Image (cartoon, rainbow, N blue to C red):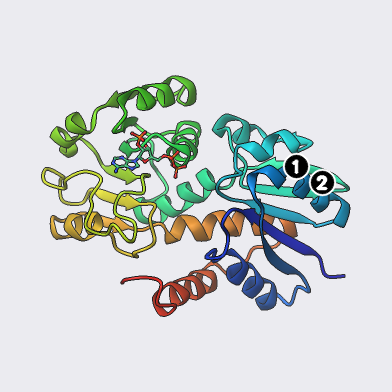
Amino acid sequence: MGKVFALIGHPVGHSLSPLMHNDAFLALALPHHYVSFDVKPDDLKEAVSGIKALGIAGFNVTVPHKVSVMRYLDEIEKEAKQIGAVNTVSNRDGKLIGTNTDGRGYLLSLKEKAGENLKEKRVLLIGAGGAARGVAVTLDRSGVGRLDIANRTFERAKMLIETGIHRIPARALTLEEAAERLGDYDVIVNTTSVGMSPNVEDMPLPVEGIRPGTILSDLIYNPLRTKWLLEGERRGGIVMNGVGMFIEQGALAFEEWTGVSPDRERMRKIVVDELTHSGRIRE
Ligand code: ATR
């Protein structure tokens, strides 16, 4: 029998997850459905009870509920606990189990560009919010050469390192310090919203000083190419946008729920087509 999967967030109207998951169900001839629900913060508790009562088989969680949903779940897996946020929940015989596929999704997308072995890579993260935390905790668990974090509010970068990074060399930087030493890094990741539509002229850091071949990775996918990526590419950077992470976090959730791997290339195509043709995005 077909199962129902869901997304809860506020707002959720622009999410590409329903399109991506429903197409993947179709491609695998699975009789399931994925629907999104706009849940206001005050209604979160009742929404999660409702999900249980209705027997919804699994759900994704997006802004602003990724942290607050945790108190309503029955179990939370270790990585999600370390990240301090849940983006994927499975309903196993009436028990809601929370996990987080954002960090692992990011890691898989990074390996597509950087290769499997990240052990020697020196990474600079820009930003210290929720998105940065997912990436930082996962890179700490999987291992990179070093992981420095630069943030507008320096104290938050320090705090993220103290609470989220335990295994690898790491240092907090101001944005000004980071701008001075861009040449020290093999991978630079923008986890902030700086450069996202409609503020497409903004850049999280300058690109002067990067070495050719440095990977510039922006979690933003609207626009598909931020000004930071365009300018970085002109300086010899290898660029990647946030589509890869979005696809991989969704594909990992899909696998968790169904036990089957979706066709990631097909997912990517439907997402990029929608982003380019919906008129919501600038190429
Ligand atoms: P998310 O969950 O998407 O990471 P968040 O937790 O609100 O969102 O974090 C946003 C991040 O983007 C923060 O690192 C924030 O810097 P501050 O900690 O100083 O607020 C960063 N950010 C947002 N707007 C910014 C701007 N205009 N310039 C520099 N950094 C910015």
Q: Name the residue under label 2.
A: 49
- Spot occupied by residue 254 in the image (x, y as percentages of width and height): 66, 59
Left or right, 16 with respect to 21, comes to left
At label 2, the amino acid type is Ser
Visible in this render: residue 262?
yes
Whether tag 1 and tag 2 are in contact, CB under 8 A, the answer is: yes
Secondary structure type for disc 1: helix
- Work out whether residue 21 or residue 153 is closer to the camera in this orientation and state it: 153
Q: Quadrant of residue 44?
A: top right
- Work out whether residue 127 or residue 261 is closer to the camera in this orientation and state it: 127
Q: Which residue is drawn at 61% across and 47% down?
A: 87
Q: Residue at x 81, y 65 (%)?
A: 3
Q: Residues within 10 Å of mark 2 (few under 14, many from 20)?
A: few
Residue furthest to the front in view is: 42
Eyeballing the image, is 59 above or below 123?
Answer: below
Image quarter in which the N terminus is found:
bottom right
Q: Residue at x 33, y 45 (%)?
A: 189
Residue 169: which disc?
none
Residue furthest to the bottom in view is: 277
Left or right, 216 with respect to 82, comes to left
Q: Residues within 10 Å of mark 1 (few under 14, many from 20)?
A: some
- Spot occupied by residue 55 in the image (x, y as percentages of width and height): 86, 56
User: Would you say the beta carbon of the disc 2 residue lies within 8 angstroms of ligand 1?
Assistant: no
At label 1, the amino acid type is Lys
User: Would you say the beta carbon of the disc 1 residue lies within 8 angstroms of ligand 1?
Assistant: no
Left or right, 215 with respect to 256, comes to left
Q: Quadrant of residue 67?
A: top right
- Spot occupied by residue 251 in the image (x, y as percentages of width and height): 59, 59
Secondary structure type for disc 2: helix
Q: Mark 1 points at which residue?
A: 45
